[in-house]
Image: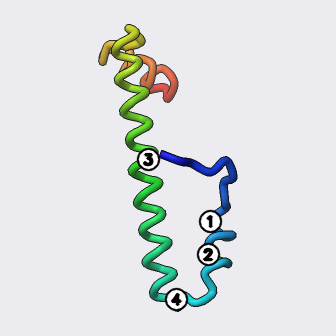
């Protein structure tokens, strides 16, 4: 897969597509938002799996106790 080293900002992409009407722009914006969410979710899952694989885990009780301590519960 070939990737370009240059990253375009969303506004730059939208500005370059001057022929789109508002409905098409909204659809494109929603599609890009969904794609970013999918990429973020994939990255979070990969990081979590890597944590599990390398033993970076915490017990439920430890996490609950830390939250309670932090929030004075």
Seen in the picture, residue 56 relative to 27 is either above or below; the reply is above
Relative to 3, say whether 55 is above or below: above
Q: Are marks 1 and 4 in contact (CB under 8 Å)?
A: no
Q: Which residue is mark 4?
A: 22
Say which element carries label 4: helix
Residue at 45% across, 45% down: 40
Q: Say few, some or many: other residues with alpha carbon within 10 Å of mark 2 (under 14 / 14 to 19 / 20 or more).
A: some
Q: CA distance from mark 1 to mark 2?
A: 6 Å
Residue at label 3? 39
Q: N-terminal of the two: label 1 or label 4?
A: 1
Q: Give me the C-alpha separation between circle 4 and circle 2.
A: 11 Å
Check disc 1: other Cα within 10 Å, few if <14, some if 14-19, many if 20+.
few
- Residue under the point 47% across and 74% down: 28
Q: Residue 43's quadrant in the figure? A: top left
Judging by the rendered image, the residue that carries numbered circle 2 is: 14
Mark nearer the N terminus (3 vs 4): 4
N-terminal of the pair, mark 3 or mark 2, is 2
Q: Report the side of 12 relative to 72 (left or right).
A: right
Cβ–Cβ under 8 Å for marks 1 and 2: yes
Q: Nearer the viewer, residue 31 or 73?
A: 31
- Please indicate whether residue 19 sits to the left or right of residue 6 in the image: left
Q: Position of residue 44 (x, y in %)?
A: 42, 35
Q: Which mark is residue 10?
A: 1
Question: Disc 4 or disc 2, which is closer to the eye?
Answer: 2
Q: Quadrant of the C terminus?
A: top left
- For the point 52% across and 91% down, the residue is 21
| Lower position in the chain sequence, tag 3 or tag 1 | 1
Q: Is residue 45 above or below residue 21?
A: above
Q: How far apart, in angstroms, are the residues tagged by discs 1 and 4?
A: 15 Å
Q: Secondary structure beneath disc 3?
A: helix
């Amino acid at each position: 897969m070939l990737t370009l080293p240059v990253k375009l900002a969303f506004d730059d992409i939208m500005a370059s597509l001057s022929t789109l009407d508002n409905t098409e722009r909204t659809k494109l914006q929603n599609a890009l938002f969904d794609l970013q969410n999918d990429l973020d979710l994939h990255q979070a899952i990969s990081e979590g799996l890597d944590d599990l694989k390398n033993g970076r885990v915490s017990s439920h009780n430890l996490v609950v106790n830390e939250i309670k301590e932090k929030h004075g519960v």
